[in-house]
Amino acid sequence: MNAAPFTPNQCCAIVEEFDPGGDGLARKSRELTIQLLRHTNAPFSRDQFAPGHITCTALVLHPSESKVLFMYHHRLNRWLLPGGHVETNDPSLAAAAAREAVEETTVTIDNGTRALLAGIDVHGIPPKRDEPFHLHHDLIWRFRAAADEIAVTDEAPRVMWAGNCDWDRLEVAESIRNSIRRVR
């Protein structure tokens, strides 16, 4: 049973339309995600550990500056884009990413800007409690913020708008850098 009101076939069509260009990491992640969607029973379920499940991330552009919203992930101890698991009440995959951004950083998303699939990144998640090591097949959605106000939350003890000059200091992953470059 799916954990969302959309089907794996609908999601597969979105992923198949994504053009990674010369980004080999995104191309490989795109193919792995298509296989997940075509050959597993519950690709949106956070309880499907082999071969993993779909997650959604928000690449939120600052409303007026050339910056992107980042949060310090409390468990992984690194700077990431806000995002997380698909919930049963999410009306779309992009909506899942937007919901996570709002929950984690209190950002206000500009509803007048259409969400765009900016990247796909399959990456490993370390084991915790009752969860084994597994893969997140992460769909990275581009949004624009309506305002620059953000705040820390329990899930994001630090948040910031970061420009390209901050990427090395924050140790931003290449997949995130490539996704940002695709939408600028």
Image (tube, helix red, strand yellow):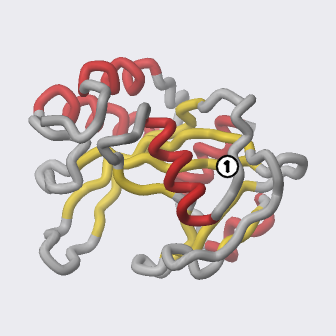
Q: Position of residue 17 (x, y in %)?
A: 44, 18
- Tell me if residue 11 can be seen: yes
Whether residue 139 sits left or right of residue 180 in the image: it is left
Q: Residue at x 35, y 18 (%)?
A: 13
Q: Position of residue 79 (x, y in %)?
A: 57, 71
Determine which residue is flagged by label 1.
60
- Tell me if residue 25 can be seen: no
Q: Residue at x 69, y 57 (%)?
A: 107
Whether residue 84 sits left or right of residue 37 in the image: it is right
Q: Position of residue 181 (x, y in %)?
A: 68, 42
Give the residue type at disc 1: Val
Q: Residue at x 55, y 40 (%)?
A: 141
Q: Is residue 172 above or below residue 154?
A: above
Whether residue 31 sits left or right of residue 57 in the image: it is left
Q: Quadrant of the C terminus?
A: top right
In terms of secondary structure, where does tag 1 sit? strand
Where, by quadrant of the figure, is residue 118 drawn? top right
Q: Nearer the viewer, residue 54 or 89?
A: 89
Crowding at mark 1 (Cα within 10 Å: few <14, some 14-19, many 20+):
many
Q: Is residue 134 above or below residue 178?
A: below
Residue at the far front in the pictured view: 89
Residue at the far right in the pictured view: 64
Q: Nearer the viewer, residue 184 or 71?
A: 71
